[in-house]
Amino acid sequence: MGYSFESKGICMNKVINKLFSSIVFRMGAMMFGVSFVAIVSMFSSVFISELADKDALAINHAGSLRMQSYKILADIQQASLERNINSQNQLTADIVEFEKKLNNPVLTQTTSSDEHPISLSLQKIQQHWTQGLALQIEQYHRNGSSSNWVALRTEFDNFVVSIDYLVNLYQQHAENRILLIRMIQGVSLFVTIVLVILLMLHLSYRVEKPLTELTNSARKIMAGDYTAHTNIMQNDELGFLSSTMNQMADAVSQSHLQLEKRVKQKTAELRQSNESLELLFEVSTTLVQSTKKLELEPIVKKLSMISGVKDLDLCLTTQDGSAPYEHIITNDREFRDNCKVGNCGDCLTSSVACETTQSLGPIGLRYPLRKGEFNFGVLVCNLEANSSLEAWQHQLFQSIAAQIATGLKIRQQTEQTRRLALVNERTVIARELHDSLAQALSYLKIQVTRLQKLHQKEASIEKIDEVVDELKRGLSSAYRQLRELLTTFRLKIDSDGLQQAFENTIAQLNNRAEGNIEFSLNYQIGDIPLTPNEEIHLMQIAREATQNALHHSQGSYAKVSLFSDQNKSINLVIEDDGVGLGDAPEKLNHYGLAIMKERASQLGANISIRPNSPTGTVINVTYAPAYVTGKAVATEPQYTKA
């Protein structure tokens, strides 16, 4: 029993908790109450209606007893006057009918208790009939007299009064049941109205207003206002939803703020990266420029602005120097003491970026400008005490230092290449002069010496004129060779391209030939990319071959062809219909053939010189271009001494 009571208590507590903490449970309870009241009202009305089903019949039976009483009284009077058997039978039949109605169960079904006033009144009437009135009727029937008739009539009147009272009791009982139905219906209607009003008030104050507040808050949150909160102090689903939505709005607001912070941080990082890349590009552009003056001060100042470090020193030194030839500072200050006295040993160390801390001075971070074994100076970053660089600043300084070192290295290599190119060019000029003008002048010197000896020996005029003619021919040949050398040294390929350079050369050769020999061009490598060195070598080989054809072939035409074969190799073919090279071609214009062979070797090409059919010479140069092999081509050949 204790367990049962405890279980019931727990269940009751759960129901009460749900009633106060669940809006759905409360609304369900109210709807259940309304439905329960309506059902109770309907069942009560039906039950009472079923109980009052015999009330009208009982009233009708009770009312018929009055009529039956007066009918018996009339039958008694008639029987006393007529004294026949019919009257007696009619009286007996009416008395039997009366007793049957008086004892009819319908009169007792309306009450469920013997103590009910209707039951007591009915028993009194039944007793009055059996013990009083029935005996008086029988006595009067034996010896009726006028005095007995008056007494009998008076007794019937009293009996009818009792029946009237019973009928009134039946009427009151029926009316009470109808009144009870009315009271039940009224109470049910009142309770239903009260429950509906409570339900509507509950819906208005505990559902509709909170839902409206939640809806407005949701709309504000959807519009981006994450500070919109609801003040719903209810211990139910809407209260839980309100607190959850407030927490969600706070969480979304915090997430949004963190996201905005991260976006700003990433934007700042991207801006720093972009500025750093722009600075690196500017450094590369500045260093690859061909201007002699290298302006690094704007770059260092921009580096100071981007990195946020105001005090930077950039010292540029030569390979063998111990002091900088250029010292750039970004902070408006004087040079440090060690800089004034030229004590640069600590800064120009060969170690990697290191950190030195002075007791009250700044922290110096050194970034050497090193490229391989070459040291071009140092970039010094001076920080305040108790400060340090961030990772991106350190990486930026390292990148700038490496970029400057690489650029200076490239400029150094470029200058070295230019010097080598100048030396090679002078060597080429010297060898060209040696193979042409120097030999021609030597020949003229010999002829002058010979002329002097003839003059000393007082030789004949014929011998002297012969030497003079030799001098004239030698001078003409030297002058022609000088013009050819000038034309060769002026050879260049401008922005119009290799094809236009070949066309200009062919046009110049036709003008110089004056119709004695016709030069033509078949150019079919316009869609093949060539390096500048390849173009120069091809142009020089073609020019040397056409010069030989112009001066020595004695033919009527010369054709220059450039095309590519199936192996993507380039073919340069120069052919003519002249007299050919003979048995010893190296003795004729020997320096021109040497130049062609040397340039072909620099291209990595195969060169063949063979007779043409039926007459003439064919020079064929075949090589794989650099875009196929991936190999570089030398700028100028290293000629062997002829």
Image: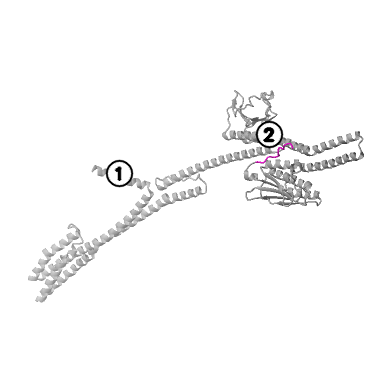
Asked if residue 361 shows in the view, the reply is yes
Q: Pointer 1: what residue?
A: 10
Q: Is residue 216 above or below residue 287?
A: below
Q: Quadrant of the C terminus?
A: top right
Q: Residue 182 occupies which quadrant of the picture?
A: bottom left
Amino acid type at image mark 2:
Gln
Amino acid type at image mark 1:
Ile
Secondary structure found at label 2: helix
On the picture, is 291 further left or further right than 232? Answer: right
Which residue is more in the foreground, 438 or 75? 438
> Could you say which disc has been placed on residue 594 in the image?
none
Asked if residue 174 shows in the view, the reply is no
Which residue is more in the foreground, 572 or 488? 572
Q: Pointer 2: what residue?
A: 412
On the picture, is 88 further left or further right than 397? Answer: left
Secondary structure found at label 1: helix
Where residue 351 appears, as percent x and y from the top left, is 60, 27
Q: Quadrant of the N terminus?
A: top left
Residue occupying the point 59% across, 28% down: 354
Q: Nearer the viewer, mark 2 or mark 1?
A: 2
Q: How many labels does the image show?
A: 2
Q: Give the range drawn in magenta.
A: 632-642
- Crowding at label 1, few (<14), some or many (≥20) Cα neighbours within 10 Å? few
Q: In this view, does 503 lie above or below 485?
A: below
